[in-house]
Amino acid sequence: MNTLTENTTKTICYHCGDECRDEDIQINEKHFCCNGCKTVYEILDGNDLCEYYNLDEQPGISQKKEIVRNYDFLEDSDLINKLIDFTDGKVSTVKFYIPQMHCASCIWVLENLNRLNSGVLTSQVNFVKKTVSIKFDSTNTTIKELVILLDAIGYEPALNLEEKNEDKNTLENKKLYYRIGVAGFAFGNIMLLSFPEYLSIEGVEVFSLKQIFGYLSLLLALPVFFYSASQYFESAYKGLKSKIVNIDVPIAIGVFVLFTRSSIEIIFNLGSGYFDSLAGLIFFLLIGKVFQNKTYETLNFERNYKSYFPIAVTIKKADQETTIPVSKLNKGNRIMLKNNELVPADSVLISNETNIDYSFVTGESEAVHKVNGDLIYAGGRQIGKIAEVEVIKEVDQSYLTQLWNNKIFSKGRESKVVSLANGISKYFTIVVLLIAVLSSIYWSFYDLHTSFNVFTAVLIVACPCALALSTPFTLGNTLRIFGRNKFYLKSTEVIEDLGNINSIVFDKTGTITQTGQSKIEFIGDSLNEIEMALVGSAVKNSSHPLSRIIDNFLNVSSVKSLDYYNEIPGSGIEAKIGEDTIQLGSPKFLQLAKNNSNSLTNTHVFLKVNNILKGYFSITNQYRKGLNNTIQKLAIDYSLGVISGDNSRERENLLRIFPPSSEMKFEQSPQEKLSYIQHLQSFGKKVLMIGDGLNDAGALKQSDVGITITEDINNFSPACDAMLDSSKFELLKTFLQFSSTSKKIIIASFIISFIYNAGGLFFAVQGLLSPIIAAILMPLSSISVVIFTTLTTNFFAKSKGLL
Amino acid sequence: MEVMIVLLAASILVALIFLGAYIWAVKSGQYDDRYTPSIRMLFDDKNNKKIDNISKNVDTKS
């Protein structure tokens, strides 16, 4: 019965599903929480698109914010050319990224855009990537109209000029799929043709058939050898050229010997060849590659400042406001910044005053007050009324963006440790070649033909298929397990690097402290208005962060001028207004008997008015949940450090959490952070950097592994190797441990594949390797290694609570 | 035994057709997005009446 009464009191918006609290607009017997939602409904209703509401319950996106955006900059032809994927003058295609996409209704309405705008020919959604590709008649409509339409129905596209490289990735994937298809096709058919051989069917008539079967197998193996396996030859060649014996070298040798020996056997009618093993080997190896390449398509790990900065800004030209793309911004342009907008280039403030939040850029946690003539750095967020600024530096020459001129950003990621498989393959190759040569020399005393057979058989059977598969399957599975726990890795190589970490460096703001307002309350006698005004006026004079928080909390409008004001650093403030005196600060400063009652989670600021204790402000520190615990666990195995762009006022608090050995550096510029990581690495340390903001971008890139912490993985985060959802911060140690576990699993599966190799060699050196043994041994070793790695990673993940 | 040759040719031909179908599927982008089509097939082309039934079916299933 309870639910019934609740239903009658609560009205739910028909569009977005929010409760209609402030407003309740009704049309067609439907309720809406705001004008925005109603407008979207009217657009859809007017175009007969109300199926939208039938597919999912309240599918819409809340329109309460009612921001009117100006899309005039989309008339700029350079910008349009960058956005458009393809055009032939009439028909154009464009792809928009739409972060708000979340349900079946979204797909439906976005694929029916042609009913809202007749210029749209087709539109197709990729829900996983959250994109919509629109094919439109450019004589009939424009990009600007499309964007305005999408915005009007609540799907504002995130415009970005930086994300065009994804297509290359899908092309690579497609090629891999083709190769697998060809190899699988050949594998199955050659297997069928080899059956008579397996079953040793003999007979006079069968003899000619046997030859036909042989030639057919050779024909089928040609595309496998020349097309599907070509990557292994390329990679082995590249490796040898730079004097590295990678895992592809023994594979390439094995495949090459397999193919030549089999061809010779078929052509000279000496035997039936090993084409079935060849095709099977390539088929399994390529499937391993798919596992290795599996990544998170929706996440972008390569972002730089350009994807954080706005795509366009409002400028003032001859008292007219227009929008232009940021790329066309010049020195001397006057920009109008609305509340919460970003400063795109270093500028000077023209308006009287404003506040700039630099937390994302420099790590300073409090907004900075700026007055007319002050310098404002690019990347800061303007808070307050509309402010006018004048650009004094080009966008890419600004203080922050200069960081990206560092050469570290032009390098691609290269795993800083030699992967286990590649490390082993050098010795493996040498040993196999030695065995092959020695056994063929031994046999050459008896029979030259057998000597040749033994030599090739050793190389064939030692082809490290299982060895090559153990890494991608173990790491691919680990990647998936981490992803389930909201820890997203850029590639499987990151896991091997994570397993080698011995030093961890944390950023402060946003990483170990949480973003957002700190909680504050006053405990004690309630203050009357006069007292509030007194305290409020006094704290306005102090720039101490606690004063700023109290000032924000009281929000006093009638500020009184002080007759006396004194601030004692580290203790508190005292002030006098007329006859009233106030003291605000630590218990010691107020000569209270109590000990320092600050705890790790709370800071107390005591208040005396006219020498009478009134109570205290309790301010919750913004440390991340479970920080203390996590750090203590990490401190056992790793050396820790904190590097912050903020000032050192938190040092005291941090010292209570971090072990005494950890290094702490404050007021570090982005460049200094990068240098600090380099400094640690010069001592041979393997550094894990954990950060969140643009100011960490250099350090994240320089470190062996860079992790960004984020509240929402679709939000902007700087280029990194992995993203960790902030709710899973406590699992950090488990993730690191599990990475080492995966490494051990790989080593264990290496041992298994060595045993198989040894077994194969046992037959090979005796000259007994028949095609059927090879055909059984290869798939058996590969499949058993894959099963072993999958089961063990799952088992350990379960025991660590990750599954 | 000539029949073996015929059978052989037939089996390879069938396998080639499947390979061709696979390559066509990859080429046309069926492996690029493996989620959206599963939802899209529930939509009906410009026929509003059936949509109600579909959404009811989806509801009862979930």
Image (cartoon, rainbow, N blue to C red):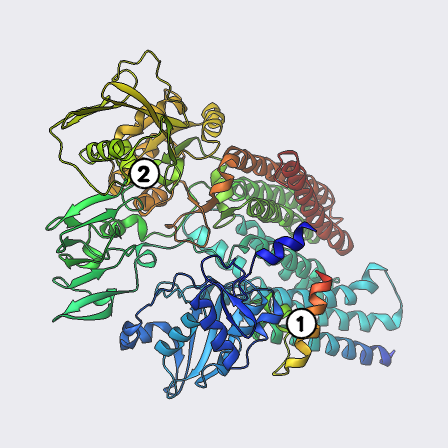
**Mark 1 and mark 2 on one chain:** yes
Question: Given the current orientation, which residue lies at the most extreme top position?
Answer: A593
For numbered disc 2, what is the local secondary structure?
A: helix
Residue that label 2 marks: A553
The amino acid pointed to by label 2 is Phe
Q: Is residue A341 left or right of residue B30?
A: left
Residue A434 rendering spot, x and y as whole percentages: 58, 41
Q: Is residue A153 above or below residue A648?
A: below
x and y percentages locating residue B27 in the rendered image: 57, 74
Residue A222 visible? The answer is no
Quadrant containing the C terminus of chain A in the rendered view: top right
For the residue pair A643 and A479, the one nearer the viewer reads as: A643
Instruction: Tell me the tag on residue A448.
Output: none
Q: Position of residue A376 (x, y in %)?
A: 18, 50
Disc 2 packing (10 Å; few <14; some 14–19; many ≥20): some
Q: Chain of mark 2?
A: A
- Helix, strand or loop at mark 1: helix
Which residue lies under the disc numbered 1? A219
Q: Horizontal placement of A449 versus A615: left or right? A: right
